[in-house]
Image (cartoon, rainbow, N blue to C red):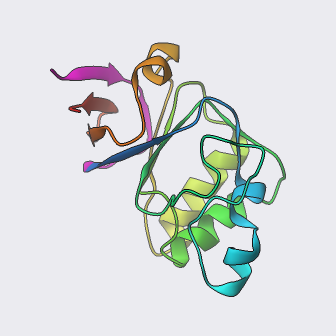
Amino acid sequence: MNKTFKGRPIIPGNIRGEALVTTQGFNILASYMGEGFLEGEIGICSDQNNKALYGKKMSGKVLCLPVTIGSTTGGVLLQIACKQKSAPSAMLFSEHIDSLAAAGVVLSDIWGNGKIVTVDQLGTDFLDYVKDGMVMEIKEDGTVIITG
């Protein structure tokens, strides 16, 4: 059975991917600045305070989250992750996107040699429903269809 959510497209796109979910704020700096980022093992979450994501591969996943938190370097790190092919393929926010994450996905789209499809305002029901590994399809108009 499919479940559909509608949000606001920030960086529109049509993609299909596997969900990676956190219900707490996503700290971009802590998640990407572990030893792996500096030594070549990129795309593995290094934020020990985020138990849902720690040690998991983020690259190519549909990252489902409420908001981002942390340092003002977050936007630049998303751009770098995109250039290194270690960024998530999409970021789906249950709440409003914050200015740092918005800057990062826009920079990635313009200068990062890639795109992180981004939708916000999907609602708290979205994060209550979605689980790691669920397959989802994201449409350009901000529609998210979860198929399993």
In the rendered image, the quadrant that contains the N terminus is top left
Q: Give the x, y percent position of residue 145.
A: 25, 30
Q: Give the x, y percent position of residue 60.
A: 40, 61
Q: Give the x, y percent position of residue 123.
A: 49, 17
In the rendered image, the quadrant that contains the C terminus is top left
The part of the chain drawn in magenta is 1-15
Tally the numbered discs. Answer: 0
Q: Is residue 121 magenta?
A: no
- Write the residue at 43% across / 62% down: 115
The residue sitting at the right extreme is: 71
Does residue 82 appear left or right of residue 140 in this picture? right
Q: Quadrant of residue 7?
A: top left
Nearer to us in this view, 54 or 93? 54
The residue sitting at the left extreme is: 1
Q: Give the x, y percent position of residue 40.
A: 62, 85
Nearer to us in this view, 92 or 133? 133
